[in-house]
């Protein structure tokens, strides 16, 4: 009997916020993108992130982690500087933990 890794055992949502555009993709353990898209953020990016996370989590129940990259700085999980006003002083870690992946 031969054992091998199932790359779709756990999936990851990777997000990158560049100015007013949110680029995102869902990938498996091999790094293969299963779905990818980009969306323009004209308003509060937090609402877009919440909606996207709920949609992706419903579509991919094996979602294990979410990664967000943006132009700014953080200290102890709090956004200290960001070009996006809506992200400033947000506790990103707490926000993500309040919406756990199942």
Image (tube, rainbow, N blue to C red):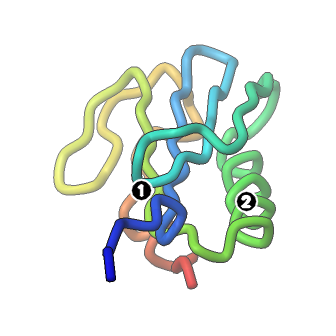
Q: Is residue 62 above or below residue 44?
A: below
Q: Label 1 neighbourhood size at 10 Å, few (<14), some (14-19), many (20+)?
A: some
Out of 30 and 78, give the one closest to the viewer.
30
Q: Is residue 70 left or right of residue 47?
A: left
Question: Which secondary structure, mark 2?
Answer: helix
- In the rendered structure, the answer to whether residue 6 lies left or right of residue 38 reads left
Q: Which is closer to the viewer, label 1 or label 2? A: 2
Q: Local crowd at mark 2 within 10 Å, few (<14), some, or many (≥20)? A: some
Measured along the vertical axis of the image, is residue 10 above or below residue 27? below
Q: Quadrant of residue 65?
A: bottom left
Q: CA distance from mark 1 to mark 2?
A: 18 Å
Could you say which disc has been placed on residue 56 in the image?
2
- 29 or 15: nearer the viewer: 29
Residue 19 on image: x %, y % = 59, 14
Name the residue that disc number 1 marks. Answer: 92
Could you tell me which secondary element the residue under label 1 belongs to?
Answer: helix
* Residue at 79% over, 22% down: 40
Q: Residue at x 81, y 25 (%)?
A: 42
The residue lying at 35 percent from left, 68 percent from top is 4
């Amino acid at each position: 009997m031969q054992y091998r890794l199932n790359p779709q055992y756990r999936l990851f949502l990777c997000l990158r916020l560049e100015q007013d555009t949110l680029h995102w993709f869902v990938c498996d353990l091999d790094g293969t993108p299963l779905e990818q898209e980009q969306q323009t953020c004209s308003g509060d990016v937090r609402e877009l992130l919440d909606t996207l996370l709920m949609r992706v989590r419903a579509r991919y129940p094996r979602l294990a982690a979410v990664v967000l990259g943006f132009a700014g700085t953080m200290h102890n999980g709090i956004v200290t500087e960001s070009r996006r006003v809506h992200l400033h002083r947000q506790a990103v870690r707490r926000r993500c933990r309040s919406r756990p992946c199942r």
